[in-house]
Every structure is written in C-alpha cells, then in structure tokens.
Amino acid sequence: MHYWLMKSEPDVFGIDDLAARPGQTEHWDGVRNYQARNFMREMKTGDRVFFYHSNAQPPGIVGIVEVAREAYPDFTAWEPESKYFDPKSTPDNPRWFMVDVRFVRKFEHIVTLDELRANPKLTDMPLVRRGNRLSVMPVTAEQWQWILKME
DNA sequence: GCCAACGTTGGC
DNA sequence: GCCAACGTTGGC
C-alpha cells in the first residue's frame, strides 16, 4: 500500500462533493501534467490519498480518500465540449489517465499549508516547496503518519 | 485580482 | 535541440 496526495479546488470539486456522490466514489479527471499522470498510473486499489484543497481559504489537507479503481483513460480528453479536451489524446492512443477515488473520512480539523510548512519533518514534500504545482504526488509512510498526528 | 514559478509549444 | 513566448497553477 502506498500513500499519495491529490489537489482539488473546492469550488470545482471538494471533499464534500466526493462524499455526496453515489457510492462516495468519483473519477479524478482533468490531470494534464505528465508527472502527475505517471503517479496516478502507479496507484493501486486501496492506496490511501490525502485530499488537498487548493485555491481555498485556507489551503490544506481536509481528509482521506482511497483508490477505488486503478488508472484508465481519461475520457474527458475526448470530449470536445470538455474544458479538459485534448485532441492529441485518442481512444486508440490515450494520453491522459484517471483513477476513481472513494471517500474515507474528513479530518476534524484541516491541516493547513502553513502548518505543513512549519513541520520540519515535511520539508521534503513537493507540496511545501516554493513554486510547486504538482497536483498528484507520493507521500512517504513517515510523512503520512506525521500528518495524521497534526490533524 | 495579481503575479511568480513552472510546463509546454513552436519557430528556427 | 534551444529558448522565447505563452498558458496555467495556486498562494497571497
């Protein structure tokens, strides 16, 4: 089992939106960055994921979800009306992938970006590094445990 | 709304 | 294959 962190804007799709979906499960579409895509392709069913709210007040980790389905082609890339449309991705040769995630639980208290930055155990996380824009990233088991203690 | 940081694109 | 221009991310 591996650990991850995924970012989403709560105005677009927040953890409460996931919890309200049928089966509390939804596909994670719209990743259009190769590094993030590659991480998603490494995900296994049952892997745990921190759900991070970006462009939020305050930004931070708001809960835990799990991988419910391993990577498969992101079909929104094939939909011309989608904001994630990419003509270079085709059903025969898909460029972008997504996983399904299932709600596990919400934190009682958000672990804010400020708090994550202030923890010297977490300085290696891409999340807290200046200018980082990666929306899907691995979390080590040690980092995972530290963050749980910060809840 | 601003803008720094960064990834991608495309001309050469 | 370089790199300037451009678009996007995401904190503030």
Image (cartoon, coloured by chain):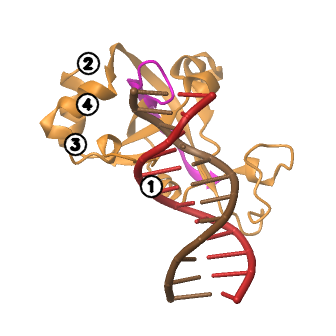
Chain colours: A orange, B red, C brown
Relative height, residue A70 to residue A34 (above, below) = above
Q: Quadrant of residue A82?
A: top right
A79 horizontally vs A145: left or right: right
Counting residues from the N terminus, which is met first, the one under dot 4 or under dot 2?
A: 4
Relative height, residue A11 to residue A93 (above, below) = above
Q: CA distance from mark 1 to mark 3?
A: 16 Å
Q: What's drawn in magenta, residue-wise?
A: A52-73
Image spot of residue A133 (x, y percent): 46, 47
Q: Which residue is rendered at x = 19% and y = 30% of the image?
A: A118
Q: Which residue is mark 1?
A: A39
Q: Which residue is mark 3?
A: A141
Dot in front, 3 or 4: 4
Image spot of residue B9 (x, y percent): 69, 68
Q: Which residue is mark 4?
A: A116
Q: Which residue is mark 2?
A: A151
The disc labelled 3 sits on which kind of residue?
Ala
Residue A66 on the magenta span: yes
Q: Is residue A1 visible?
A: no
A59 horizontally vs A78: left or right: left
